[in-house]
Amino acid sequence: MKLGLIEKYRSRLPVTPATPIVTLGEGGTPLIPADKLAAIAGLPKGSLFLKIEGANPTGSFKDRGMTLAISKALEDKARGVLCASTGNTAASAAAYAARAGLPCVVFLPKGNVAAGKLAQSLMYGARIVEVRGNFDEALATALAAAKSSGYTVVNSSNPWRIEGQKTGAFEIIEQLGAPPAFQFMPVGNAGNITAYWRGYRESGKTRPRMMGFQAAGAAPLVLGRAVLKPKTIATAIRIGNPVSREGALAARDESGGLIDKVTDAEIIAAYRMLARLEGVFCEPSSAAGVAGLLKLSRARFPLKGRIVCILTGHGLKDPETPLKFKYKRKTVTAGSRVTL
Ligand code: AN7
């Protein structure tokens, strides 16, 4: 039987014997080498790895924080849980709330949530509030609704979310036998880069340089100011005013890393390369870190040592984006001769 990550890392997480554990067997995701991508980035064989967070129970890294946030909400006798989300937090909250028997309300930016994520929230039985506006506006709407409602907010402003997500760093250290030299990852609300940095710091060994990448049309941390109308094909990171801004900047500065931006074209190129060259189908936002790695390698940024890219969500979350591309395909009559 696969234990969830709370049981695995109990001594390093804020739980007590009285905490009711709500788990779907999250964590323990694969870390696999990506030698073809490494060659394209001019890196030696065996130096580049992908952390497949799409292998979590609801298909994204959000499950790491949600197992803890929902367990704590249950322990605290919350009436229910709510969140605003670009889709993955909502899907994860809805699943863990269903398992806990807690009502769940999700506030979604109308028209900008990938189909698979919306399908998940519907299936898990969450109440769905579609907000005419972007994620940042949906979050403000959700927080106003939460006030004196008895509902616990499970956005990454919830401290348990970050605590749970830090376990990604613990796993990578176990899988490599040591921390990597660099970690590349997408940045939206900046909870994940904050959480990984905490995990690496708590592990008390050498630490990677944290390399975060935002979409060029939604890059508040690169510009140094909020973006009122964020725009990107990578809807998961279509966020103009990150909640964990300070955490992300600290991760960058304390690790000697950087937070940069990548264009939609660069994101899509990396997204397609991952699938075609490595057999790894992630969602577009997840490819932002790899797009950043390719961008830096083109600019001859000095990269040395082992590099991990966090692929935050599964490609099947968003079945619509791939269908926009042109592919060669043909239709034949059954029984007709097809030459290969
Ligand atoms: C696939 O679900 O913000 O920088 O509301 O779904 O920790 O926000 C999702 C974010 C990267 C960015 N990759 O992580 C939400 C939400 C995927 C994501 C991010 C998200 P953070």
Image (cartoon, grey):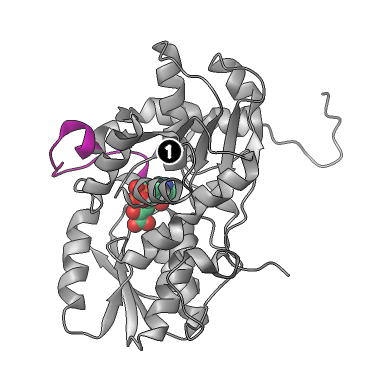
x then y, percent, for residue 235: 35, 46
Is 174 located above or below residue 261 in the figure? below
x then y, percent, for residue 72: 40, 78
- Residue 129: within the magenta? no
Residue at 50% in and 33% down = 271
Asked whether mark 1 and ligand 1 are closer than 8 Å, the reply comes as: yes
Residue at 35% in and 85% down = 76
- Is residue 316 at least partly visible in the picture? no
Q: Which residues are magenta?
A: 219-236
Res. 105 image quadrant: bottom left
- Residue 230: within the magenta? yes
Q: How many marks?
A: 1
Relative placement, left or right, of 256 versus 304 is left
Residue density around tag 1, few if under 14, some if 14–19, many if 20 or more, within 10 Å: many
Choose between 107 and 260: the one closer to the eye. 260
Residue under pointer 1: 185
x then y, percent, for residue 144: 15, 72
Res. 65 image quadrant: bottom left
